[in-house]
Amino acid sequence: MANQLSRLDQVFAALADPTRRAIVMRLCAGEASVGELADPFAMALPSFMKHIHVLETSGLVLSEKSGRVRTCRLSPDALLSAEDWFQHQRAIWEARLDRFETYVMKLKKERAAAKRSSKMIKKTTNKTINKTTERKGS
Amino acid sequence: MANQLSRLDQVFAALADPTRRAIVMRLCAGEASVGELADPFAMALPSFMKHIHVLETSGLVLSEKSGRVRTCRLSPDALLSAEDWFQHQRAIWEARLDRFETYVMKLKKERAAAKRSSKMIKKTTNKTINKTTERKGS
DNA sequence: TAATTGGTTAGCCATGGGGCTAACTATAGG
DNA sequence: CCTATAGTTAGCCCCATGGCTAACCAATTA
């Protein structure tokens, strides 16, 4: 009970394996038994079951046993939470790009104005731009 | 295609580690030197450098050394390709849901018709319908 | 030139992941 | 009742991963 990894850790770790990604892709098309899922893979069943187990503990897959057959289905929640992570990062990234772009536009204007009214001071301003991208809040 | 998969392997594996996800999140806010990146982590530098290296070979991060300082920045391509994967899976999933739903609608109609014209045969149909109501919007 | 700073290389260690076989349980079918 | 089917459990192997220290460049800076 000491070190519980975050759900994202488990979801990404689960999806880092091509076999498991293939299983998820297969389950996107509908539920299936372990045997059906395992069929395309040249792998011993116990090995395959480990993958299923990883997917289950990551929350990506749910399964239920009835009789001697275990049926697996996708639980889209974990998938969505990972997708959310990407979208969140992208939002931050794009916001920064926007801020940067407007900043550069402002600089451009200022530079143009300075050029119009003066002689030549642009070298240092240019360097300042690099510094800013490097670090924002610290 | 197989090439792309192995890249996904690396991207997901890279993101499966909380340290590395934190680095990516930090880099979404702008580029930084290795030292700056390492600062928040209670970890020896060589260990930290391994994470940077993993991120670089996964294609998530680019770095450039000038003088004795190595500056890292995010390369959004890999991030986007992973996000695409999710969106693709979700599309398939949702398409299936739609197909399933129309199928159930068809069943409902048929059941209503059967009920109108016959006695009582609802057992299995009923079970199928419950499955649908269980998850609808997602 | 000497010392400091910022990374890098090399090598060690413990753990965990992904694969296997063999043997076992439990249902379904003949 | 007997056998085949579908998973499951146990245990072994190998190598990748994530952490460490120690020693080593190579730029800056005093």
Image (spheres, coloured by chain):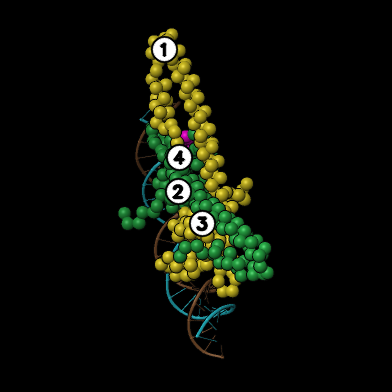
Chain colours: A green, B yellow, C brown, D cyan
Q: Is residue A99 magenta?
A: no
Residue numbers of the magenta segment? A31-35
Which residue in the protein does label 3 denote?
B28
Give the mark nearest the N terminus, 3 or 1: 3
- Same-chain status of marks 3 and 1: yes
Query: Which disc number belongs to residue A83?
Result: none
The amino acid type found where label 3 is placed reads Cys
The amino acid type found where label 1 is placed reads Lys
Q: Nearer the viewer, residue A67 or A125?
A: A125
Looking at the image, residue A9 lies above or below residue B94: below
The residues tagged by marks 3 and 4 sit, at their Cα atoms, a distance apart of 26 Å
Q: Residue at x 55, y 45 (%)?
A: B85
Describe residue A40's horizontal placement relative to residue B113 as left or right.
Answer: right
Query: Which disc number belongs to residue B115?
Result: 1
- Same-chain status of marks 2 and 4: yes
Frontmost of labels 3 and 2 is 3
Q: Residue at x 66, y 65 (%)?
A: A117
Looking at the image, residue A108 lies above or below residue B3: below
Query: Which disc number belongs to residue A76?
Result: 4
Could you say whether the residue bearing mark 3 is in a helix, strand or loop? Answer: helix
Query: Which disc number belongs to residue A11?
Result: 2
The amino acid type found where label 2 is placed reads Val
The residues tagged by marks 3 and 1 sit, at their Cα atoms, a distance apart of 59 Å
